[in-house]
Amino acid sequence: MLPWKTLPWKRALGPLAALLLAATVAVTPAAARTAASTTVSSAASSGWNNYSCKPSAAHPRPVVLVHGTFGNSIDNWLGLAPYLVNRGYCVFSLDYGQLPGVPVFYGLGPIDASAARLATYVDGVLAATGATKADVVGHSQGGMMPRYYLKFLGGAAKVNALVGIAPDNHGTTLLGLAGLLAYFPGAGDLLNDKTPGLADQLAGSPFLTRLNAGGDTVPGVRYTVIATRYDEVVTPYRSQFLNGPDVRNVLLQDLCPVDFSEHGAIGTIDRIAFHEVANALDPARATPTTCASVIG
């Protein structure tokens, strides 16, 4: 039996769409995406990316939000950014991983270069706010990529906590679809050449091998991972969890068994996950996260 015959077709659609979108990015003229680019670039953030914001005594560190693959600094955070702003945080978000001629869909460039972009951005946020350290919250690739910054680019001295929402810390098998690349001649080269940020995230990639060599964490940083068992993109979902000191791994369904959020929803609309993010940012004032947190 061919291996793709064994995949549940509905669950496979998400990862397959990602691979198809990689191909689309490679061959679609930028002009064909102008309308979408204009829509996103004109979207107004609600109270975040305010460089006059000064952290309070209650929340002394700015929060830097790092979007996921195919996301950007606005659309990934239309839920979480206002949630944190309303709780008194200074919140900032960046774009990274842009490819030439490709608007809207970011996080596609080499991840080491994206981490360098994050390093520069955090320096700017710290300079603007007067804070000595920031907290970083990322979704998907955005929860994993900052670990490169912490480990190799001096970020550990500037970051207090990293909160990863469905991060691909040890790569992804894409529900087995990554293993199917060999059945499609040229598909692997397409990923490497046209969307290196995708290739870097496959389980066993050279990037991830280097990132995870010698341990998952670095001293001085608190780590939180928030995962969902229904993740159809970062698979298996337990590969998201980190090992090491100062790590808290959270499975969303342990907090609320009837939360069925998948990979996208956990980072964009799930207020139960948002409540756990707030707890990770301010553990001294943490309150229990339950199904009722959806109205908190």
Image (cartoon, rainbow, N blue to C red):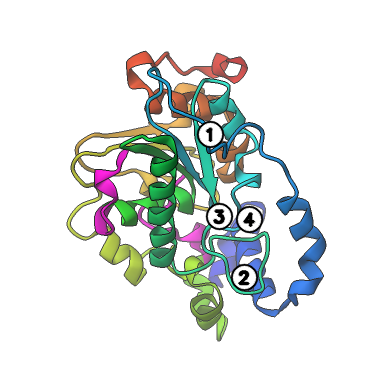
Residue at the image point whose x is 43% and y is 36% from the top: 129
Residue 285's place in the image compared with 262, above or below, is above
Q: Which mark is residue 14?
A: 4
Q: Nearer the viewer, residue 8 or 61?
A: 61
Position of residue 148 measured from the top left corner of the image (x, y, whole percent): 32, 57
* Dot 3 amino acid type: Asp
Q: Nearer the viewer, mark 2 or mark 1?
A: 1
Q: Which residue is mark 2?
A: 22
Residue 124's place in the image compared with 90, above or below, is below
* Residue 40 among magenta residues: no
- SS for dot 4: helix
Whether label 4 touches label 2, CB < 8 Å:
no
Upstream in the sequence, badge 3 or badge 2?
2
- SS for dot 3: loop
**Is residue 170 toward the left or the right of residue 262 in the image?**
left
- SS for dot 1: loop
Position of residue 89 measured from the top left corner of the image (x, y, whole percent): 49, 26
Q: Nearer the viewer, residue 137 or 119?
A: 119
- SS for dot 2: helix
* Dot 4 amino acid type: Gly
* Dot 1 amino acid type: Ser
Q: Nearer the viewer, mark 4 or mark 3?
A: 3
